[in-house]
Image (cartoon, rainbow, N blue to C red):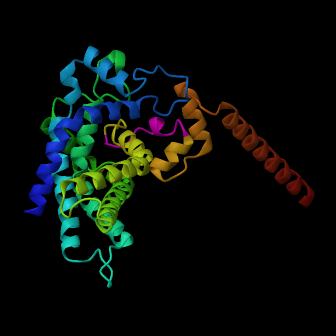
Amino acid sequence: MDFLMSGLAACGACVFTNPLEVVKTRMQLQGELQAPGTYQRHYRNVFHAFITIGKVDGLAALQKGLAPALLYQFLMNGIRLGTYGLAEAGGYLHTAEGTHSPARSAAAGAMAGIMGAYLGSPIYMVKTHLQAQAASEIAVGHQYKHQGMFQALTEIGQKHGLVGLWRGALGGLPRVIVGSSTQLCTFSSTKDLLSQWEIFPPESWKLALVAAMVSGIAVVLAMAPFDVACTRLYNQPTDAQGKVVNDELMREPVLSGFLRGSREPTDLRCTTQQSRGRELYPQSCEQRKQRTAKEAKTAASRKSRHTASRK
């Protein structure tokens, strides 16, 4: 019952917050891997984004991706909050003295979040694709041509299999680990602290409301960088084999390394940046290429002299 009620509660909130999710997704994709000032800002702020989307795409566009968003919230939060509730009811989040343990709460929140997010990853990916869809004059990021959630899941599954459906799942886990552990730990700690201070009557709805507000602020501050990376990773274009297109990932070395967990060869990264016409560090790349060529020339000269001396 805890799993069902948690999922339904999350779905109820999702209906009202989905327009914010659409705006957030597009603002996170805006200027993807481009230097500030080199791209057109279609969305200057949250309020301007609402007006722009409503004017160009229509008011219905503010609820893009609602179906996968509802399904994801039901799966993710049903599992996450239900599992965390069971751990709390079983007393696993308290010390031997009966006091609340922030460390145990954070660990339980992270583990519960991982299970829910990984299972719901294909739904979250399709949600991101649908929410990024926009008219050409205000489009940001890669534009997938999905017609709906089931069509998208079917097409991705048929073309790329299970690997394609769970593409980006591991890259999205840091977002959930940080967000879920911060949210649930902060909520439980704040609620426990307010109960000790006796600010509100026991079991009052005001107690849960204030704790939720505090945890909401904390989770936004902690999760925002990971959320940007997760959105961009899920929305990356792929080739016919379902692999992420490399030149989209290597235009900016810092974020590329953060998302992919590896460092591409310098020459390939520089060449890709120059071919795209959006090179962020032209002098650094050119200097590295010149230095590499100079070192190779010097090594060849030394080898030639060494060979001549032996003769």
Q: Which residues are magenta?
A: 241-252
Residue located at (51% from left, 43% from top): 255
Q: Is residue 249 magenta?
A: yes
Residue located at (56% from left, 32% from top): 273
Viewer-side residue, 61 vs 154: 61
Name the outermost residue toward the bottom: 96
Q: Report the magenta stretch's main SS.
A: loop
**Is 156 rendered above or below residue 57?**
below
Quadrant location of the N terminus in the rendered image: bottom left
Query: In the displayed structure, does residue 198 sit left or right of residue 268?
Result: left
Q: Is residue 250 magenta?
A: yes
Viewer-side residue, 274 vs 147: 147
Query: In the displayed structure, does residue 183 sit left or right of residue 303?
Result: left
Expressed as whole percent of the image width and height from the top left, the position of residue 107 reads 35, 68
Quadrant location of the C terminus in the rendered image: bottom right
Residue located at (39% from left, 39% from top): 232
**Is 117 rendered above or below residue 33?**
below
Expressed as whole percent of the image width and height from the top left, the position of residue 39 reads 50, 22
Query: In the displayed structure, does residue 174 sit left or right of residue 149?
Result: right
